[in-house]
Image (spheres, rainbow, N blue to C red):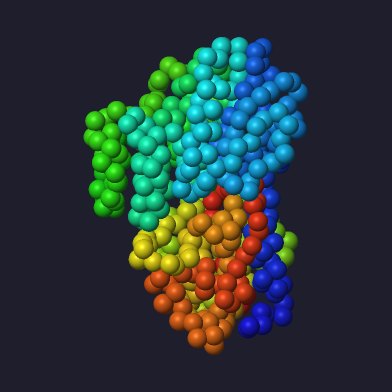
Amino acid sequence: MTDPDANTPDPHAVLRRLFDAAVAAAQPALCLPPHLPAPPKGRTIVIGAGKASAAMALALEAHWPGPLEGLVVTRYAYQQACQRIEIVQASHPVPDAAGLAASKRIAALVTGLTADDLVIALISGGGSSLLVAPGEGLTLADKQAVNTALLASGATIAEMNCVRRHLSGLKGGRLGALCHPAHLLTLLISDVPGDSPMDIASGPTVADTTRCADALDIIARYRMDVPAPVRALLESGQGETVKPGDARLAGSQVRMIAAPQIALEAAAEVARAAGITPYILGDSLEGEARDVAKVLAGITRQVAQHGQPFQAPCVLLSGGETTVTLRNPQGTGRGGRNVEFLLALAVALGDLDGVYALAGDTDGVDGIEEIAGALVTPDTLARAWAQGMNPRRFLDHNDAHSFFQKLGDSVLTGPTLTNVNDFRAIMITR
């Protein structure tokens, strides 16, 4: 491994501290309590869905002064030991029967409330598949087929969630409408570029500005093969969502308690403390993972070779959500958007010295692997070739997890109990 500049702290250790700081800044125990309202005259019902929902529920319980009850659904292994709020686990990113059963119970829990009651909805990334309630005429199998097609299509997260909203019995504002006439407060942890509430978990408690026609356009654009009942529901217009101005959502409140920008700023502070100047390039970068890698590789090369637009040592920080189009949907590649980005970055940088990078999903799961991401070093490609691995071949097969695991460069966190999307840091030491 190439030695970093003697005056620069160990890049591996610094990059991991940056990532850990980003995750810590979005922990519900830190960011949720300041947003809690006063208890209502009537009942307090807590509902929620997402990878952070159980941790959000635990933080709420710890700071709530009165009685409360509720149910949230989270990803398997993300449960928390709540006393008054029931935690149910289900599958992500493809929904399962456990998520369907939990979604039905959540809908029943908020039905028949009064204007004296308060519903607190804890919504975070991952809720789109966890809060699964098929629309009229659809089955769980239909929803599973659509989710699988979306994940392989290369569609952006906003496009995916547009389709999901119009095929749901609860998303797209429908769950919020069920809460009427109770007061509704939605607490959000954003995992989407732009932090649009209707895209976080497909917006179960907020109004939606898109239409069935938009969902059909997305399906056509990416040439997705979807079940016939899915197409029929969208073409009939009966999958339409709750729109702005709907009286059932009047007076409801939405508060963003954590977002990618907060995580990037926390990482930037750690970088400064280490004597490395941080530059936040954006919290909502989108596009094909390998294309984003090429662009950031070009900026990195300009810094390393010409000192423009920044001087080394520095670290380039970015967030957002890239996409991956599977080259062989029936293949056996083990990939995720962060490791695909990193492998493409390493290939694009070639033998450029003095550059280290870390990319990871802040929820601890990149793709479907229990692996957050990986590290790239100046000698990543050389070490790969020494083991007989062709980096481009792994990239062509969307098999970046296998690549980095063989090198011993995977980043493991376990369940982080939050989710503010992807984190990318490229350190240029000289």
In front here: 278 or 244?
244
User: How many numbered marks does the figure carry?
Assistant: 0
Report if residue 26 is visible in the image: no
In front here: 268 or 75?
75
Place residue 69 in its image quadrant. Answer: top right
List x then y, in percent, for residue 306: 51, 77
Quick one: quadrant of the N terminus?
A: bottom right
Q: Is residue 246 left or right of residue 92?
A: left
Q: Is residue 222 above or below residue 196?
A: below
- At horizontal 57% and vertical 37% (from top left) the residue drawn is 73
Report if residue 245 is visible in the image: yes
- At horizontal 55% and vertical 42% (from top left) the residue drawn is 90
List x then y, in percent, for residue 409: 61, 72
- At horizontal 57% and vertical 48% (from top left) the residue drawn is 420
Q: Is residue 105 above or below residue 410?
A: above
Quick one: quadrant of the C terminus?
A: bottom right
In front here: 10 or 280?
10
List x then y, in percent, for residue 425: 58, 63
List x then y, in percent, for residue 422: 54, 55
Q: Is residue 281 above or below residue 218?
A: below
Q: Is residue 392 above or below residue 398?
A: below
Q: Is residue 348 left or right of residue 189?
A: left
